[in-house]
């Protein structure tokens, strides 16, 4: 016995004869016909933009390691968004390295796991060997696909230890690579790299816009699937809604881009309701906040609030129409050159006006309410955020470029006002309690205004009712 093989908890001895058998008898499957990824030209441009910001420095952007769920079971792997942005690749345990070159600029190298070695048994004795996890591209195959030179990632730690000169690493994804740079890299400078990557992603290129457009289209189909289930004879629950949408996300894309919020009745007033343990009941609203993530990892982020039985009650409709008016005001404020905060103020101001007009704020004027922020008891959150590879995209971009910045063509953001009356809120009339409404769309800033990428889904109360009637048939 020269080694053991372990999978599924079973430890078995390996005879020399079995080891010899596993070493040979495998066909050469190297492929020579692979095409570059459709986004290869874009990833090259993105790397060039990064290179220009850090001349003369070695830059390391890891994809990350799989996270253990328990024992030898991992969570599904998703690479760091910045690695995916700069390479188009989704491998685990990989890294993009930008090496400064003497004549200026950088040489980009992808460090990846090569094919499993059959000679040393890694192929089947390693937990992540190809026999168990599936075939990987060889390094030369990946050079064709990614359009950049590829190296064996197992040599990277040693190369980083030997690195001389300024170096930065994107932290939080690969502890072993960070450890290799202990004493060379510096947390403050590394944070500058992380911030810059977030800022590079603020304006989307044509490929990214195509991905977000598709994410929204698939998401609209997922919402229709949910309406069909709501209208079926079978009893529905928040879980059946979550599962219905997830099926669409897995069939048309990679996953959902964030945990789906399937919030029926008073659950709609809990902003991050992802337990989804409730039932759906006629007469109540369903707030569904869900997004398909494409196979290239771009996500939609869409919310519709719909009556479970297809018809709004007069009070539900009143609240819905206030949120709709706020969303209209918000979307109208999205255009190039506008301050990022404009759409937020436009939407929130509209919400405040409605709340005051309903007598919920005593004698206060709208100006007073708005200045003191009193409406926020019921509007809770900001009105939107950037969207892209991450649902809350570009999250570490500097304030001056993001929330205090100016909208530019190519940015994509959500506009998602809402009103949430908690079930135990004694300051509103009883009939309001437990009503939560949000409408969320994904808006592309264009040269002359904006385009609603999720416009395939209805937004007015009448349109929602008509849509539900039509989809239910
Ligand atoms: N679904 C998360 C958000 O709307 O921001
Ligand atoms: Mn959302
Ligand atoms: Mn959102």
Image (cartoon, rainbow, N blue to C red):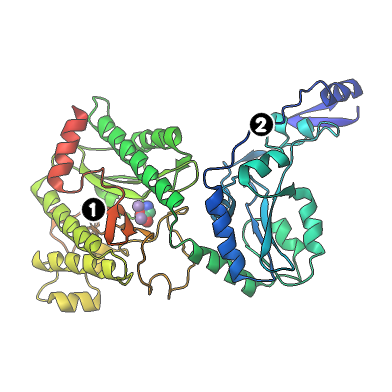
Q: Is residue 338 left or right of residue 155?
A: left
Q: Is residue 135 left or right of residue 464?
A: right
Determine the residue positioned at 49% across, 46% down: 297
Residue 234 percent coordinates (x, y): 27, 25
Q: Is residue 430 visible?
A: yes
Q: Secondary structure at mark 2?
A: loop
Q: Quadrant of the C terminus?
A: top left
Nearest the eye: 60 or 8: 60
**Among numbered discs 2 and 1, the one appearing first in the sequence:** 2
Residue 220 percent coordinates (x, y): 31, 40
Determine the residue positioned at 33% across, 61% down: 384
> Taking 285 as reference, is 447 above or below it?
below
Which residue has dot 1 on it? 436
Determine the residue positioned at 77% across, 30% down: 124
Q: Secondary structure at mark 1?
A: strand
Q: How far separated are the C-alphas under marks 2 and 1?
A: 46 Å
Q: Quadrant of ligand 3?
A: bottom left
Q: Quadrant of residue 430?
A: bottom left
Determine the residue positioned at 88% across, 23% down: 20
Which residue has dot 2 on it? 134
Q: Is residue 291 visible?
A: no
């Amino acid at each position: 016995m020269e080694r053991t093989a372990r999978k599924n908890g079973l430890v078995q001895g390996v005879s020399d004869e079995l080891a010899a058998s596993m070493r040979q008898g495998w066909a050469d499957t190297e492929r020579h016909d692979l095409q570059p990824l459709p986004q290869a030209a874009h990833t090259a441009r993105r790397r060039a933009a990064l290179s220009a910001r850090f001349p003369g420095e070695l830059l390391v952007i890891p994809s990350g390691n799989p996270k253990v769920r328990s024992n030898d079971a991992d969570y599904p792997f998703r690479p760091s968004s910045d690695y995916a942005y700069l390479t188009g690749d989704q491998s685990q345990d990989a890294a993009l390295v930008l090496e400064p070159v003497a004549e200026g600029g950088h040489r980009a190298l992808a460090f990846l796991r090569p094919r499993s070695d059959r000679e040393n048994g890694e192929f089947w004795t390693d937990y992540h060997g190809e026999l168990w996890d599936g075939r990987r591209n060889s390094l030369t195959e990946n050079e064709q696909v990614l359009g950049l030179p590829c190296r064996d990632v197992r040599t990277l730690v040693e190369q980083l230890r030997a690195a001389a000169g300024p170096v930065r690493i994107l932290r939080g994804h690969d502890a072993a690579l960070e450890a290799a740079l202990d004493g060379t890299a510096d947390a403050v400078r590394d944070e500058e790299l992380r911030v810059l990557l977030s800022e590079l992603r603020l304006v989307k290129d044509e490929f990214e816009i195509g991905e977000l457009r598709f994410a929204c289209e698939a998401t609209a189909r997922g919402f229709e699937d949910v309406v069909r289930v709501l209208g079926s004879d079978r009893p529905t629950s928040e879980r059946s809604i979550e599962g219905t949408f997830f099926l669409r996300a897995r069939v048309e894309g990679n996953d959902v881009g964030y945990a789906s919020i399937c919030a029926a009745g008073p659950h709609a007033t809990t902003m991050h309701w992802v337990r989804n343990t409730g039932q759906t009941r006629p007469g109540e609203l369903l707030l569904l906040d869900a997004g398909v993530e494409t196979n290239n990892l771009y996500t939609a982020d869409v919310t519709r609030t719909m009556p479970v039985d297809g018809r709004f009650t007069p009070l539900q409709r009143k609240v819905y129409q206030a949120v709709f008016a706020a969303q209209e005001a918000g979307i109208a404020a999205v255009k190039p050159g506008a301050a990022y905060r404009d759409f937020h103020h436009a939407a929130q101001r509209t919400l405040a006006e409605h709340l005051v007009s309903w007598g919920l704020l005593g004698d206060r004027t709208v100006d007073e309410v708005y200045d003191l922020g009193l409406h926020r008891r019921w509007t809770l959150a900001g009105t939107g955020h950037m969207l892209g590879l991450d649902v809350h995209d570009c999250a570490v971009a500097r304030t001056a470029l993001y929330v205090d910045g100016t909208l530019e063509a190519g940015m994509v953001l959500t506009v998602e006002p809402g009103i949430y009356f908690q079930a135990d809120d004694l300051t509103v009339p009883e009939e309001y309690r437990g009503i939560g409404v949000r409408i969320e769309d994904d808006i592309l800033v264009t040269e002359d205004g904006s385009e609603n990428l999720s416009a395939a889904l209805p937004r007015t109360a009448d349109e929602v009712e008509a849509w539900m009637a039509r989809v239910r048939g």
